[in-house]
Image (cartoon, rainbow, N blue to C red):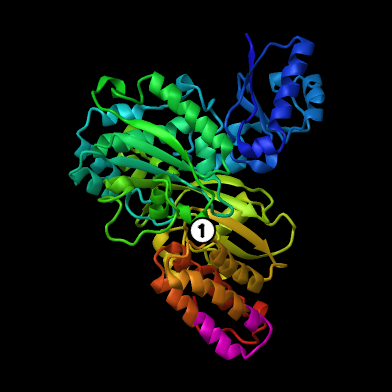
Amino acid sequence: MSIQIFVPRDSAALALGADEVASAIQAMAIQRGVDIELVRNGSRGMFWLEPLVEVVTDAGRIAYGPVAPEDVASLFDAQFQTGADHTLKQGLTEEIPFLRQQERLTFARMGVTDPLSLADFEAHQGYAGLRHALILSPAEVVQQVLDSGLRGRGGAAFPAGIKWKTVAAAEAAQKYIVCNADEGDSGTYSDRMTMEGDPFNLIEGMTIAAVATGATQGYIYVRSEYPHAVATLREAIEIATAAGFLGANLLGSGLSFHLEVRKAAGSYVCGEETAMLESIEGKRGVVRAKPPIPALKGLFGQPSVINNVITLASVPIILARGAEHYKNYGVGRSRGTLPIQLAGNILHGGLIEKAFGVTLRELIFDYGGGSASGRPIKAVQVGGPLGAYVPEAHWDVPLDYEAYVAVGAAVGHGGIVVHDDTADMSKLARYAMEFCAIESCGKCTPCRIGSTRGVEVIDRITKGENQPQQVKLLRDLCDTMLHGSLCAMGGMTPFPVLSALNHYPADFGLSVPSTKAA
């Protein structure tokens, strides 16, 4: 009987040499007459251990990592294929503390299965949610999503069930399900990991959304910088269609749902839902004024559900296990789990799925192991390049949408970027304004002009030019951007700027704390 050996095909693992490791293992097994079955799985999300090689034993899956091609001979010498000891042995994969302490619901199959094996997917509760949805009425499916408390995981945190209910109630000959996979925030990769490591889960979530709302066509809008995700999704769609999980007659139900991938045009602002719709329609990615809302007049002017990858990928388990099961995780109005992405100056960067309520201090020290540099951590940016810099005073605030708003921050997409005490917060604030100026679609004045003026004002502050007046001007400018911008591009740029100014005034050359607390 052949021995199963798993080597990830995730982009992060590939960048660290996973293909070369897989080839070396295959060649060495042939050379030594060892009968193996090499499976290319998704990543477990422990990036400091990639490429992570796993071997199936009677005791469970044993992990070795990080493995380089030159390590393969010594692994075979030690008979790692039997789970034997080696300097790279990490023990039972599931018992590695980083993984053991998580609550993996959306990411339950991540790194466990072959991403393109439908049999593997179904053996791990795949399509159980869709099968259950098909025996319910559309209204009952929507109610399950509403009752679960699932909110948009892309950053806006709008209740997913309300969007679905609005589209379901709309009268139209054609409706759409659109997945926003234009994951452009710095330090975020949960969407990419899902598309590459568990694509059928996303497809199942979108199909359930179609069943609930009466949509017959879906699009996955994937950023152009994710070629592996695009290729994996397209192959998965073909496999699902051939097996009857997509197409003209879903599992014999008489319902239809067709799905295709659209590659993004390389614009950060197309992560905003209406700019994304413009891009799918073949136009320049410019933000639309609302109303009308996309749920009533979205893609090609028709009612459209627009959700982020993680939102849609969270749906199958809700339908498979029930709304109450999912709702039992989390705190307050933040229900379920969030895939948190640790990046930046962090010793153990990677994907952590936890119920809402975990704190930054737990994440960066208990999971992340502190800074990679070994220096004290100074600031943690939560929620992407437009997220606030969270000072140590707030590291014990539970990760919860409302709790973070109360301290002038945002959970966003769950991206966390760590900075040590060498970071210059004035430069990071300036970068936020410059980023906005470069990436703005240009439609509204507060964003287009405000960001350009913001760079100039920050420069004057750091040069010590009439600082009190310039600080007041910067605050007024941020207020205008916050309340006058058409979308979050200009509306959230003040978050990193003001949080840096409020909590780290010395980095701006200010001798006393500025006047307005975050």
Q: Magenta span has 2?
A: no
- Give the overall secondary structure of the magenta segment: helix
Q: Is residue 455 left or right of residue 159?
A: right
Query: Does any portion of residue 322 appear in the rendered image?
Result: yes
The magenta segment is: 459-475
Tell me which corner region of the image, top left, top right, bottom left or bottom right, holds residue 469: bottom right
Please identify the quadrant where the N terminus is shown. Answer: top right
Q: Magenta span has 474?
A: yes
Q: How far across and down, in percent of the image, does residue 230 sit?
A: 52, 35
Q: How far across and down, in percent of the image, does residue 504 sit?
A: 62, 76
Q: Is residue 225 left or right of residue 444?
A: right
Frontmost residue, 40 versus 54: 40
Frontmost residue, 151 versus 20: 20
83 shown above or below 260: above
Q: How far across and down, in percent of the image, does residue 208 sit?
A: 32, 35
Q: Is residue 96 left or right of residue 102?
A: right
Report the amino acid beneath label 1: Gly
Q: Secondary structure at mark 1?
A: loop
Residue to which mark 1 is pinned: 383
